[in-house]
Every structure is written in structure tokens, then in C-alpha cells.
Amino acid sequence: MKIFIKGKGIIAPGIGDEIANISDEKRECIEPDYTQFFDSRMLRRMSRIVKLGSTAAIMALRDANVESPDAVIVGTGFGCLEDTSLFLRKMVTNKEEMLNPTPFIFSTHNTVASQIAILLKTHGYNSTYSHRNFSFESALSDAYFLLKENEVKNALVGGIDELTEDSFTLLKRLGFYKKNKAGEGSSFFVLGNDKDENCYAELKSVQMLSNYNIDEIKTKASSFLNEEIDALIIGSNKEEISENDKAIIDALHAEDKIIFYKHLSGEYPTSNAYAFSLAIDLFKNKDVKNTLIYNNYSGTHHSFILLSAC
Amino acid sequence: MEIVVTGLGIISAIGKNVAECLGSFEKHKSGVAPVQYLSTRYAGELSVAEVKATNRELANISELPDNLSRSILLSYLAAKEAIASLPENFGDTYRVGFFSGTTVGGMDKTENFFEEYTTDENAGNIEDVKYHDCGKTADHVTKQLGLKGTVTTISTACSSSANTILLGARMITHDQLDIVIAGGVDSLTRFTLNGFKTLQILDPEQCRPLDETRVGLNIGEGAAYIVLMSEKIANELQQEILCKLTGYHNANDSHHQTAMSDDGNGAFLAMQGALNKSNLKPSDISYINMHGTGTRNNDKAEGLAIKKLFDGKYPKLSSTKSFTGHALGASGSIEAVLSVLAIKHEMIFPNFSFSNPMEGLNIIPETKFQKGIKLQHVISNSFGFGGNCSSLIFSKY
């Protein structure tokens, strides 16, 4: 059974090089007019990350012509940071007294996926992955095998992380933004196991391999590294290609096929979901047959996403 | 393909390994007590179910540094016990997955950091924040255990670790992985204790799940992992097969961020889906290890869902949260371990502190620890905030 990408909804700091919400240090999302999606009463009750997620989800579903998905699977590296910070700060400054439950309620990592389920009144499979820079791949892999099992016909899959004042301060102190500007984004996709006119690309394979050095990866991921690809999407920036990325480029002889994205998306754990949107767009060019996204972190955690033309 | 369970590891308020936890049940000893280890203004005031050890003591047992997050220490100990029967370097020959569920990861370190940080944004030891994200725990633990393979983390509130077991089963079924270590961890934090307190669903004393007079839950902590593989690989590796995993299902209640629908629709769909997956009828089920948190809302909704699905003909049932507390993201795998033990050792775990059945439901949980009870099929329920409902079915091998 083949798995296809049938719709996308992206809220990002910019689409392409031209329109970018850019400051010296941050790349923040260009947010849509939410009143086009929700009434004002609903909007008042939604946190920013829920707005970003629900709106991108609706955009993807409309694009795929799917009213309500059979499964909702979200990846988020850091979850609902705004509400987490709010509750934490109040808890500390009020010395554990006089706390408002609302930020706690919306601080759980599964808030976006569950709010989407409530919004769409869907009772199907619902999950949230929060595994650092592999949060989106994890969600994508889950959807892939769920669809292969034919338990569901379509699945809404997203990658989302928000940039907040506290997350910016803390991640900057941790050196997270040494190579790229701080970023954020919400990228949702509809995947399905039947082919129709809505088809961006076929999702051929997703794999995550942790605690391997790059030489081990050359053997472990040889199926990916023997593919004839037209484009290789990597997380390094143009000025400074990491050792791991170099090794993968060499193995694939892909020097002239590299696509960079972090200068567009900024740095955040699910920026790979934004890279995924760039990858599926490449197939608008009919000469493109295969694209590969290679993502890695800590030097020892590697992921591969292989896409093919429909 | 038969998916079997070959290894178990657990650390909870009632013991630091499988044997200790079983001993507590046998002695009918609940792990719920006033706060003793967590630094909070509610120390001695609110009852919780803590793992009875300081971080330093946990570090000593695990031979890890004591400046790690408590979740890493707990997760490491449970995972290490779970994989004890596997041969050395099994990762060289077999494709391995390590799937962990958690709700707050290293929040214990973050909330301490925030004490200084909120006064000055350059203050506090920034190294403490490295433990915050959910995935850090699994990455640290797998590195420490020398596990290579596919590693990920699920965060679906209180069903997190049940969902890792579902995922493990799927990845084995699709021949993507040979051996999966699935489970989860959560440590007690001020963040969660205060969160649940503001929601007014904490019982300041010992909780009373399924009892008409129940007023709330006791937050717990701990970690538990089970080892899953195909029957074929279990035989190849000469592993003792403890039981089979025959059914699993994930559904969403789609009702409210924190409250379950009145009729427990999500719970009903999860159990029904798991039964369908395993090709079993309600009457085949010998025991249900209920989610049974002790809140007014959960126990009634879950009870109604069970009443509907079983048409009022209840199998044996109990909520072991009356012993272990509600260990949030770890509760699903803690109860999965207990369900496996119930089948393997032919025992039923009791429901602590039950006396009055819930009005209109007539659900009478088991209140005594019993041995010599043959169980064919056991349902383990896990439901969470955000309507995330998952049910697992373990069956006798």
C-alpha cells in the first residue's frame, strides 16, 4: 500500500526568500487573519499555539478536501511553552498559592492535537510526539504505518513549536541559536492511502536511528544512501555544513542537489516539518522524481524521509 | 503475528522493582502518604504516592550522578530491570526501539531553575534546563544503557505510556523492529501537584477510586517498561514469554480538555476497539485494571463505559492507583506491568480503601489480594487530558 501527501497548511516566518517576518535574532510566524477560520468567541479561548496549530490543520484539510481526518498526530519538541511559562512563573512568584488553572490545563503537550479533535469532533486515533528534533518524524512515521495497516484512510500530521520570550531567552543561553536565528512554525499535512487528484508526493519511507555514529549510519541507512535523488534537504546552513551533513552529501554525491531551509524557518525542534513542505513542493517540477530529507541532532541521532513523485 | 511480552521493569511508590511492588500488594500496603521528598509548601499536608527515595539515593542505586532529573533516574532503573533477561549487545543483531511516554520530562529541574530565573533572566544554572524537554529523558537513558535504534517519546497526558506500547506493537507487526522497550516515566513535581490542586481534583488523604465517597486522586510518580517482541524472536533469544499483547486501541473522547464526557464515550471506544483488534468478546475478559483515578468525573465515566460495553455483566476489576497513586505519563505502563504480572502469576490486585459502590453502577472492585486466579484476558485502561483514551489487552500465553 502506498502513502500519499494530499494536503498542506503552513504558518511560518516566511514562504520562500521574499516574504519573511525577520528581525535581527528571531524569525516569527506571519500569522493569518484568524477570524477567517474561527469566530471571535472561540478565538478568545485559544492560546497562540492552539491558533497556530488549528489554523494550519484546517488549511491542510481544506487543501486535501478532507472534512474530518481519521487520525490526528502532532509532533512538538517543546509543547505549549507560553502556558507552561505562565503557570511556572505564577507558581514560583505566588509561592504555590492563588493559581489560575487555565494555563496548566493548556500546558500539556497534547493540547494542540486534542483541541483539533474537539474542533473537528473526531473520535479517531490521536497522538502527540515530543521527542526533540525528531518530534515531526515520529508523528510522520506513526501515521505512515497506521495508514499501511489500513486502520485509517487519512491522517492529519503536524509539526509545531512556538517561540516565546522565555524560550528565546533560555534557548539562547543554552546556545541553541548559535548557527541560526530563533524560529517557530506550524506545518500540517494530510496523508492518505488512496491516490486521487490531490497528491503532492508519495511518502516512501521514514526512519529514525539514534545513538549511531556517522560511519555506522552509512551501513544502517544504505537503502536511503543508494537512492537516485534529485534533491537533498539538510538542516545545516549554507555557511557552515556540519560533518554529518557533509558525509551524507558525499555518500549520495549530492553536492549540486542541496537545499537549505533553516535560514527561512529559523531554528526550532520541528523545523523539519517546514522542510517537509519544501520537499513536497519540489514535485511541482515534473522532472523531480525523488527527494530526501536528512535531519540529525547531537551528532548521533539521524533521520531520513524519502519522498517520490506521485 | 503473535506479539509477546518478555520483560518487565517498574519503580513506583510501592517498590523499586517488580518483586518489591508485588510484596506491597501482598501486604496490602499502599504507597500513598503525605508529601515527604518533594520540596513544596504542601509537604506533610497533601497525600501523594512518591517513590520512597531521594534523588541521591536513586543515583546511588543506579550508579548515575545525582544532578540528573528525577525522571532520568526513575526511567533508567525501570528500563534496566526490563531488559535484564536480554543477552548482551542484543542491539547489534536485532532492530531495537525504545519508546517512552512522559508528561513533564525534566520539569523538576526547570521549576527549581525558575526560582532564580524569575528574579533575573541571567540567573540560575542554565544546565538544569537541558533536562526540560520530554525527549531528553529517553535520549539520556538509551545512551546510558548502550541502546541503539529507534528512540522516541509520546506525550498524550495520562495515556502517554500506554500509547508507547501500542506503537511498539505496530512497529513489530510491520516488521520495522524486532525488540521494543515501551513504557514511560513521570516524577512528582510542584508543577503537576499545583496544577491538579488548582483543578480541585486532589484528595488530600488516601484516594478512594470507584467509591461513591471519592473526592479526587493522589498524584504519584514512577516508571515502568515492558519488552515486546514477536514470538519467533522470543524463542530465538530463549526469552521466557510472560503473556501476549493481543489488543490495543487509541480513541479520542473529543469532549473537553480536562474532563471526560459524562458517558465516557472515548473510554468506551478505546475498550471496544481493543476488543475488536483482539477478536474477543466482552465475556472473554477476566479482569480490568481500570484507569480509576479516584476523581468524581473519571470513575463515573469509565464505569458507565464499562457498564455499556459489558452490558452490566462485569468481569473482576480494580484500580491499582489506590496503591501506586496516579503516576500520570507513567501510569499506563505501570498498570501494563501489573496486568502482565496478574496473568503470569495468576493473581488479582486489590482496590485499596473501597467500601461504597458508585450510585447506579453497582461496580464492586476486588478488595483483597488473591492468588491462584487464572486470568485469560486482561484489559488495561489509560485515559488522559485532551480526551486521549487508550486500552490494551494482555492475554495468557
Image (tube, coloured by chain):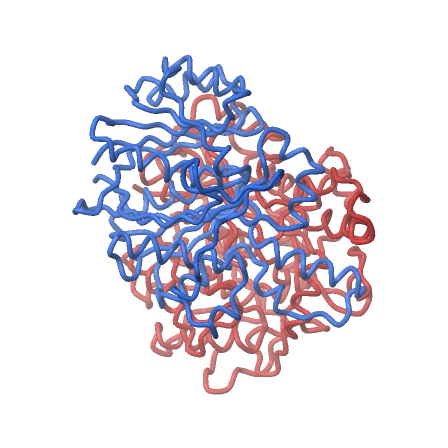
**Location of residue A139 in the rendering, given as x and y in whole percent from the top left corner:** 42, 45
**Which of A9 and B227 lies nearest the eye of the viewer?**
A9
In this view, A113 is above or below B54 = below
Q: Which residue lies furthest to the bottom in this view?
A: B360
Image colour assigned to chain A: blue
Is there any visible trace of residue B123 in the rendered image? yes
Going 48% across and 60% down the picture, which residue do you hit?
A51
Q: Residue furthest front?
A: A18
**Which of A143 and A262 lies nearest the eye of the viewer?**
A262
**Location of residue B181 in the rendering, given as x and y in whole percent from the top left corner:** 50, 39
Q: The red chain is which one?
A: B
**Location of residue A286 in the rendering, given as x and y in whole percent from the top left corner:** 20, 30
In this view, B351 is above or below A210 = below
Q: In this view, does A310 lie to the left or right of B170?
A: left
Is there any visible trace of residue B181 in the rendered image? no
**Which of B275 and B146 lies nearest the eye of the viewer?**
B146
Q: Is residue A141 left or right of residue A50?
A: left
Q: Which residue lies furthest to the left in this view?
A: A196
Going 76% across and 69% down the picture, which residue do you hit?
B46
**Location of residue B198 by image quarter:** bottom right
